[in-house]
């Protein structure tokens, strides 16, 4: 059956217009975020003569000399320190926080809601308050200017997050799997380690990465608690007072590269994790 | 079954959750509770344990004390930055809620600032806004300006640089909270609205916005509270030119070697956070009650 | 009638293809739906029926092809301009609005005056029997009540086309049966062109004026319930409709003196003269014989007026006594044939039975194309 079929041109135009606007906005957003990263990497590696030439926007000659200088000044040690602190933080916060996360996920008990609320409130507490008093305490305990000391402080900062995230992840593993384990001969602990833990591993790995980043980027507490053995952010913070431009650029570069690696490796998890936990 | 027949292990198992949480609580008490108390001691009690307002005096009237400026700038920065951030983050979240090719790559890019420290962010924008930085060079080479815009060394310009950097850095935090909240709203809710005649704006006003309110509130509270702790960005870009509470705390501790004053600053930040947090909660609670929920 | 065009409209799909990345969801759909008709899109999960519905709604755009309402090409038109209504599978009743506000929403968007909104909301609520629930919030309602809210909301605007995506699948069995008839009655009353998606053949057969059976992105057959049941166009439709499923047996076609023989590994069925012309291209070849369980009768239960018949033999392998019917699984040697008969007959396992086949009701399918020849 043939019939007159009217196609409104404006319908088609509106459809494509919408697509173009979306593409445009996304491009602006992505460029706005990515450009500073890119320029930092470029300038940190660029030849000073070309940088100071006002006509050259993007240099063509590159050098590693700035990075090298920074490393000589102590950036490498600081980076190692940051890694150690972050790893320790993960170990401590998970050792203490995972059981609590499990408790919140699997048990119903009196005071559960209040305790949970308390932990959520703790997250919003300005942790910098503990930095100075902690230093005083550390002097007495001999922990001042130690990586262990910083890690312990970071653990306190990370615990609320770890508890809430792991609680959510464990809750996401159906309790029936554990119960099946219990039926077939395991006790509660066995069921946890042989059934729940392997299943929760991806989520827990993401939580670990999240904790790593938190500790890696933390600057105030680390800067207060350390003098010689500084973490990377504290080290750079200290340095920039009298540093040349290029040292600053190199500093930015060194701090940014690991971050880019993080996102490349675990981007998908991070988005999911952050959104849920930061709520 | 009488009481004597229940084995001890079963009786104890009632307390299992508490045992599991005990380490956390103990840790919190030791590493947060104790320092908190110590902080108050440091701020208001001298070495002999007598109550003293010496630190308060130093804070308010001491030579070179920038307390009032620090308070002013901390609050001013928050007041300027947060509304802009929340608006941008909100728009961004709505944008990313649509389907388009390359969405994942774009998403990971947009959250990049979340992975770096505020010191790094400050340095990155130092690169961008320096006299020979990208921003100036592009504008000069395009002929839009003839002299570079100097951002560093002049207080007002430094303020602007800080605002730009903070917006760049922390919008991602707000974005991701709102975005997560948006993801949780079933797509069918707006498809239904669209089928029933709602324009994009109407869908937003009647469906998306009301359902997103909890996320928005959470984002607002978190962002505001963290804004009072602003430190790395300011220190990197402006040093003490633009004093902020956290910066003054750091300065008091590391340069002036006055832990009492530093503690006091930290306590003021905490006090401000609690006060504003409580206000927010009260305000939002009121809105919920009025909406009949 | 307070709105402009509230006439029923006919819907046409022309060559609709839909690709999601590498997967092809729809492989060329052509369908004509008449105004006021209740058409069911029926098929197993993944066949593309929901995708088709969403393309008609405008929630998806086809990769190729056109969607036409009346004489207007609406392919690029956004859903809100198509004057349609939809009941979603999960109802999509907005949780932050009362039942009243949910139902009123489409009218509010169209800027209908308040008194008119009130009148129509109450009318729809009355029709769906949810008048007492108007001030409640969705979380206070049961699934069935929420579903009625979704339906009320869909009919309150008097749409040109009403779309329903498996609205009954989340309800328990009793409620489902009740709602089936209520929805059909409703549709007859308000006379709107309705397109209904389901995987449940009973729903399709009882509610549809016509059914479009779909599989793997294609329409396998469009027809009235009678046509689909009695004249399935291919093996898929024949097997999908009818419970228990139609029996399929491979048979070879042989010419015989007075007719045609269908030879299977266990038995031979003799067809009279008239079938020679229909099957002459298939002599010597294998075909698929289809016969429904309900068209086979044990001795003593054969209807008197059966014209053409033949017999097969087998041993009872399993019996399902359902009360009203008895389902007999008969082992004919190398296959199990399913026979459905009256509940009063209950053979024992191991019994040898003779079953009479109604030859008027057999189907023969080309083995390669799976299309029905008879």
Image (cartoon, rainbow, N blue to C red):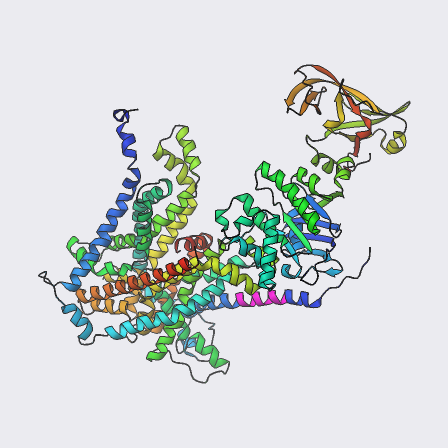
Q: Is residue A20 above or below residue C323?
A: below
User: In the image, is B239 to the left or to the right of C67?
Assistant: left
Q: Residue furthest left?
A: B48
Q: Is residue A185 magenta?
A: no
Q: Is residue A245 above or below residue A113?
A: below
Residue B125 appears in view: no
| Quadrant location, the C terminus of chain B | bottom left
Q: Quadrant of residue A227?
A: bottom left
| Number of numbered discs on residues | 0
Q: Quadrant of residue C263?
A: top right
Front-lying residue, B253 or A279: A279
Q: Which residues are magenta?
A: A16-26
User: In the image, is C332 to the left or to the right of C156?
Assistant: right
Q: Is residue A23 magenta?
A: yes
Q: Quadrant of residue A150?
A: bottom left
Q: Is residue C39 above or below residue C345?
A: below
| Quadrant location, the N terminus of chain B | top left
Front-lying residue, A62 or A237: A237
Where residue B140 appears, as percent x and y from the top left, is 47, 81
Residue B241 appears in view: yes
User: In the image, is B105 to the left or to the right of C79?
Assistant: left
Where residue B183 appears, as percent x and y from the top left, is 49, 55
Q: Residue at x 65, y 45 (%)?
A: C183
Mainly helix, strand or loop, the magenta region? helix
Q: Residue at x 16, y 53 (%)?
A: A141
Where residue C241 appears, as percent x and y from the top left, is 71, 36
Q: Residue at x 73, y 49 (%)?
A: C37
Q: Residue furthest bottom?
A: B146
User: In the image, is B105 to the left or to the right of C239?
Assistant: left
Q: Is residue C244 above or below residue A25?
A: above
């Amino acid at each position: 059956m043939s019939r007159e079929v009217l196609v409104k041109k404006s319908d088609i135009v509106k459809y494509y217009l919408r697509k173009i606007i979306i593409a445009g906005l996304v491009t602006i957003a992505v460029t706005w975020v990515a450009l500073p990263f890119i320029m930092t990497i470029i300038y940190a590696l660029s030849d000073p003569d070309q940088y100071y030439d006002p006509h050259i926007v993007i240099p063509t000659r590159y050098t590693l000399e700035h990075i090298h200088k920074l490393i000589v000044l102590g950036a490498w040690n600081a980076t190692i320190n940051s890694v150690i602190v972050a790893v320790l933080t993960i170990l401590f916060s998970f050792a203490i926080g995972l059981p609590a996360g499990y408790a919140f996920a699997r048990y119903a008990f009196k005071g559960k809601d209040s305790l949970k609320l308390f932990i959520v409130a703790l997250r919003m507490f300005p942790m910098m308050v503990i930095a100075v008093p902690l230093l005083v305490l550390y002097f007495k305990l001999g922990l001042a200017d130690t990586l262990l000391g910083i890690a312990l402080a970071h653990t306190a900062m990370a615990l609320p997050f770890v508890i809430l995230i792991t609680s959510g992840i464990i809750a996401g593993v159906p309790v029936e799997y554990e119960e099946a384990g219990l039926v077939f001969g395991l006790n509660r602990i066995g069921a946890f380690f042989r059934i729940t833990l392997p299943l929760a591993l991806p989520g827990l790995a993401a939580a670990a990465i999240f904790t790593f980043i938190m500790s890696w980027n933390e600057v105030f507490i680390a800067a207060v608690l350390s003098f010689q053995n500084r973490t990377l952010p504290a080290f750079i913070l200290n340095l920039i007072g009298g540093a040349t431009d290029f040292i600053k650029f190199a500093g930015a570069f060194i701090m940014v590269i690991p971050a880019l690696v993080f996102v490349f490796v675990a981007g998908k998890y991070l988005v999911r994790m952050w959104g849920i936990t930061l709520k | 079954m009488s009481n004597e027949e229940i084995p001890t292990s079963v009786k104890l198992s009632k307390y299992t959750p508490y045992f599991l949480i005990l380490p956390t609580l103990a840790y919190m008490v030791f590493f947060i509770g104790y320092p908190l108390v110590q902080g108050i001691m440091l701020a208001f009690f001298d070495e002999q344990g007598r109550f003293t307002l010496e630190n308060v005096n130093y804070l308010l009237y001491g030579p070179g004390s920038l307390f009032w400026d620090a308070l002013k700038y901390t609050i001013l920065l928050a007041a300027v930055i947060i509304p802009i951030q929340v608006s941008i983050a909100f728009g961004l979240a709505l944008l990313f809620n649509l389907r388009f090719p390359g969405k994942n790559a774009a998403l990971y890019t947009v959250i990049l600032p979340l992975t770096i420290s505020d010191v790094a962010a400050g340095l990155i924008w130092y690169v961008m806004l320096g006299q020979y930085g990208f921003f100036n060079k592009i504008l000069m080479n395009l002929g839009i300006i003839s002299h570079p815009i100097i951002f560093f060394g002049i207080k007002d310009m430094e303020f602007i640089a800080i605002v730009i950097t903070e917006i760049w850095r922390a919008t991602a935090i707000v974005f991701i909270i709102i975005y997560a909240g948006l993801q949780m709203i079933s797509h069918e809710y707006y498809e239904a609205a669209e089928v029933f005649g709602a324009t994009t704006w109407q869908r937003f006003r009647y469906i998306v916005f009301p359902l997103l309110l909890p996320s928005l509130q959470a984002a607002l509270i978190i962002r505001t509270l963290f804004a009072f702790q602003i430190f790395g960005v300011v220190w990197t870009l402006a040093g003490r030119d633009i004093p902020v509470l956290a910066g003054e705390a750091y300065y008091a501790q590391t340069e002036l070697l006055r832990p009492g004053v530093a503690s006091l600053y930290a306590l003021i930040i905490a006090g401000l956070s609690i006060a504003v947090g409580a206000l927010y909660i009260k305000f939002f609670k009121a809105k919920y009650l009025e909406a009949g929920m | 009638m307070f709105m402009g065009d509230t006439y029923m409209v006919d819907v046409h799909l022309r060559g609709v293809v839909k690709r999601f990345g590498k997967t092809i969801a729809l492989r060329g759909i052509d369908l004509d739906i008449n105004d006021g008709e209740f058409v069911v899109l029926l098929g197993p999960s993944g066949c593309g029926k929901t995708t088709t519905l969403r393309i008609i709604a405008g929630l998806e755009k086809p990769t190729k092809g056109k969607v036409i309402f009346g004489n207007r090409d609406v392919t690029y038109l956004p859903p809100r301009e198509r004057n349609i209504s939809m009941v979603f599978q999960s109802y999509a009743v907005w949780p932050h609005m009362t039942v009243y506000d949910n139902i009123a929403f489409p009218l509010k968007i169209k800027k209908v005056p308040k008194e008119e909104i009130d009148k129509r909301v109450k009318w729809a609520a009355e029709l769906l029997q949810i008048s007492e629930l108007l001030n409640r919030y969705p979380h206070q309602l049961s699934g069935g009540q929420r579903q009625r809210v979704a339906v009320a909301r869909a009919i309150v605007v008097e749409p040109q086309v009403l779309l329903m995506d498996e609205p009954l699948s989340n309800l328990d069995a009793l409620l489902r049966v009740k709602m089936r008839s209520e929805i059909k009655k409703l549709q007859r009353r308000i006379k709107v062109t309705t397109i209904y998606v389901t995987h449940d053949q009973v729903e399709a057969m009882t509610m549809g004026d016509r059914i479009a059976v779909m599989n793997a992105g294609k329409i396998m057959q469009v027809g009235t319930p009678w046509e689909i049941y009695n004249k399935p166009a291919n093996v898929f439709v024949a097997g999908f409709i009818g419970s228990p499923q139609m029996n399929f047996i491979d048979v070879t076609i042989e010419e015989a003196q007075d007719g045609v023989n269908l030879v299977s590994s266990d038995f031979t069925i003799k067809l009279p003269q008239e079938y020679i012309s229909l099957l002459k291209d298939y002599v010597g070849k294998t075909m698929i014989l289809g016969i429904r369980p309900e068209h086979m009768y044990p001795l003593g239960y054969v209807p008197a007026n059966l014209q053409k018949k033949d017999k097969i033999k087998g041993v009872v392998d399993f019996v399902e006594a359902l009360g009203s019917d008895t389902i007999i699984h008969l082992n004919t040697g190398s296959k199990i044939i399913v026979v459905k008969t009256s509940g009063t007959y209950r053979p024992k396992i191991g019994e040898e039975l003779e079953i009479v086949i109604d030859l008027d009701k057999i189907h023969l399918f080309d083995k390669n194309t799976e299309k029905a020849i008879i």
